[in-house]
Image (cartoon, helix red, strand yellow):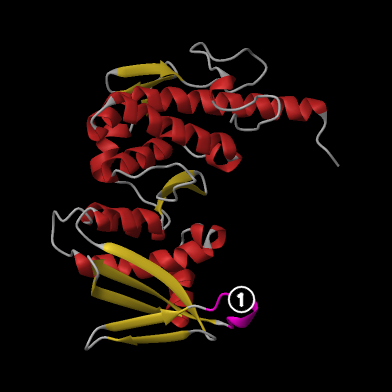
Amino acid sequence: MSPKPKQQSLAVQVGRDQMATLKSYLEARNEDIATVLGGHREAKRLVASAMICAAQSPQLRQCTPVSIARCVMQAAVLGLDLSSGLGEAHLVPFKNACTLIVGYRGWQRKASEIGYNVVSEPVFEGEAFNYTKVPLVLTHTPVLRESDRGELVGVYAAAFRGSELYRAEWVTSEDIAKAQKMSKSPAWQTWPNRMRRKLAISRLCRELSPQRGSGLEKLVQIDEASEAGGRPDPVIDRTVDIEIKPDNTLDAGSHSFHEAPKTYDDDLPPWGFDDSEVYDAETGEVKK
């Protein structure tokens, strides 16, 4: 049974108010994001990507604005893109909070910044695979037909410097199942294949650059937080956290703006929100 017109109208208005609040919240942090990224154009692009993610996901719009802002700042610190097509980082709702999930391509990008080309592939029963640690040898001949592959055996990640194999990591299917069971991240249900690759790559990258200040240290910290279901980031929270004042405004350091109205029978909030910027208010579809 399709929703009644009044219910649809209310849902649209709720979505518009949620988007308007989030837009104002992120714009209030635009200077901080621009400082991290080194320019306002890059900051606006990252914020626009976050808004598109929210427009596409009603569950994400229900997350607290501060948790979304925290994830946007984390993506800025890591230098990762939130565009879904790139797969570097994702805004994932977990209960009423947003969690930044770094995709395996985000790990590959950060590894490339310190001189490594990292690849990762799953291995199935029907495929030819050989891996030894000493001497370091890894060969893999994939089976092209899915029907001939058999069960998953594991996933490997390999780091190359130029054409030379520098280090490799092998994760068995049993280890993958254990990691998935222990993780509180909802990403395992949404992108199981990507998360398997990410598991192997993240373990490899921890071995590639364990020292402090290597460029991967913050990535490891954020990844561990996301696997635990998300938790506050003390450094970034000093930038994005705000308080609700008694007069129903949000204090964001040098910025203040009205909170979204609690009812949905009025016009748009006073700051205004142009639905055409991100999505169609009547259909809920993202603008191309």
For the point 17% across and 65% down, the residue is 210
148 part of magenta stretch: yes
Q: Position of residue 230 (x, y in %)?
A: 40, 52
* Res. 72 image quadrant: top left
Q: Is residue 78 visible in this depiction of the protein?
A: yes
Identify which amino acid the numbered label 1 is placed on: Arg
Q: Nearer the viewer, residue 149 or 179?
A: 149
Q: Position of residue 74 (x, y in %)?
A: 32, 43
For the point 28% across and 84% down, the residue is 137
- Horizontally, is 58 left or right of 28 in the view? right
Quadrant of the drawing holding the C terminus = top right
* Magenta range: 143-150
Task: Establish if 240 lies above or below 74.
Answer: above
Q: Position of residue 106 (x, y in %)?
A: 36, 53
Q: Position of residue 253 (x, y in %)?
A: 28, 23
- Horizontally, is 178 left or right of 225 in the view? right
* Res. 243 image quadrant: top left
Report the magenta stretch's main SS.
loop
269 part of magenta stretch: no
The residue lying furthest to the left in this view is 212
Residue that label 1 marks: 145
